[in-house]
Image (spheres, rainbow, N blue to C red):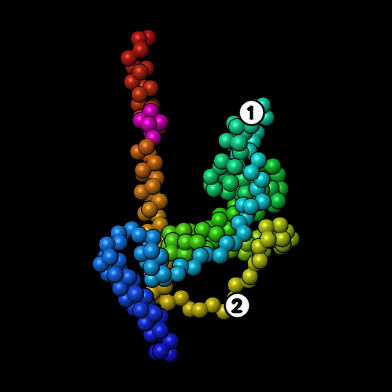
């Protein structure tokens, strides 16, 4: 076992010695450091980086000629020329805009009415699109702890929604899982006892998340203009003052 661990180190040391010897010999002959021969030697000494395996994206089925969500319902979009239509289509769209369209496509499969945006089935569809997007991102960036935490929170939320739907309306639960391609796994009958350390850590994570949301909300309020940020009491006081100054 020890020999197997030492072999890569020995090979790396031999490669480094060869590279040092090649650079020393090239310097003695007056060869510049940016020579292509030295570059080949440097590339030989570097470790080989394995490329991540490509995985199919859930956004591949969106046609590039489809218009963005904000321009799809405009009748003027059909009368523009090809260049402008390409700019308004998904060919020039960002991933966030594509995910919005994907969310609506998944929600259309399970919603009851055209204006249904808050039912349990629609919420599950929105969370499914978000989870699949984060899974693709974490496949190429596994050390992104923030997005990994967001994905785990979305998974937990979707699991609770599916559990409530399974207990209340089982036929709707089966149809939702079938249409969205979700494989629901029931929780185990016996769970591990929650330790004090785990409870404290979960409470700390919740407190940190709440404080971050408060800071974000405060930042959004500061960005609003003063006329929109005036409170109801301030508007009432200004109206009373104006009535007093107006002559009878």
- Residue 95 or 65: which is nearer the viewer? 65
Return the disc, 2 or 1, that comes first in the chain's sequence.
1
Image quadrant where one finds the N terminus: bottom left
Q: Nearer the viewer, residue 72 or 50?
A: 50
Residue 80 appears in view: yes
- The quadrant holding residue 73 is top right
Residue located 70% across and 51% down the image? 109
Circle 2 crowding by C-alpha within 10 Å: few under 14, some 14–19, many from 20? few
- Which residue corresponds to mark 2? 189
Q: CA distance from mark 2 to mark 1?
A: 61 Å
Residue 230 inside the magenta-drawn segment: yes
Extent of the magenta region: 224-231
Q: How many marks?
A: 2
Q: Which mark is residue 81?
A: 1
In which quadrant is the C terminus drawn?
top left
Residue 220: numbered disc: none
Horizontal and vertical percent for residue 229?
Answer: 38, 33
Kindly tell me whether residue 161 is visible in this rendering: no
Q: Which quarter of the figure has residue 78?
A: top right
Graded by Cα atoms within 10 Å as few (under 14), some (14 to 19) or many (20 or more), the crowding at tag 1 reads few
Indicate the quadrant where residue 114 lies: top right
2 or 40, nearer to the observer: 40
User: Residue 215 at x, y = what percent?
Assistant: 36, 48
Q: Is residue 190 above or below residue 55?
A: below
Q: Which SS class for mark 1?
A: loop
Q: Position of residue 101 (x, y in %)?
A: 61, 45
Q: Is residue 204 magenta?
A: no
Secondary structure of the residue carrying numbered label 2: loop
């Amino acid at each position: 076992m020890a020999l197997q661990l030492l072999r890569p180190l020995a090979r790396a040391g031999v490669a480094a010695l060869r590279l040092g010897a090649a650079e020393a010999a090239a310097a003695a002959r007056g060869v510049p450091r940016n020579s292509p021969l030295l570059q080949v030697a440097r590339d030989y000494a570097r470790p080989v980086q394995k490329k991540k395996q490509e995985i199919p994206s859930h956004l591949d089925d969106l046609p590039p000629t489809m218009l963005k969500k904000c321009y799809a319902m405009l009748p003027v979009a059909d009368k523009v020329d090809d260049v402008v239509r390409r700019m308004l289509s998904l060919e020039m769209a960002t991933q966030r805009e594509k995910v919005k369209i994907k969310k609506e496509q998944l929600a259309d499969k399970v919603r009851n009415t055209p204006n249904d945006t808050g039912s349990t089935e629609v919420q599950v569809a929105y969370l499914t699109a978000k989870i699949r997007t984060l899974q693709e991102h974490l496949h190429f960036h596994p050390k992104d702890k923030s997005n990994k935490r967001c994905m785990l929170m979305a998974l937990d939320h979707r699991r609770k929604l599916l559990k409530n739907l399974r207990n209340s309306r089982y036929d709707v639960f089966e149809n939702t899982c079938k249409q969205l391609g979700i494989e629901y796994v029931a929780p185990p009958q016996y769970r591990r006892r929650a330790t004090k350390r785990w409870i404290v850590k979960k409470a700390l994570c919740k407190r940190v998340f709440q404080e971050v949301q408060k800071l974000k909300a405060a930042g959004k309020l500061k960005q609003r203009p003063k006329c929109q940020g005036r409170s109801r009491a301030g508007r009432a006081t200004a109206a009373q003052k104006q009535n007093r100054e107006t002559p009878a």
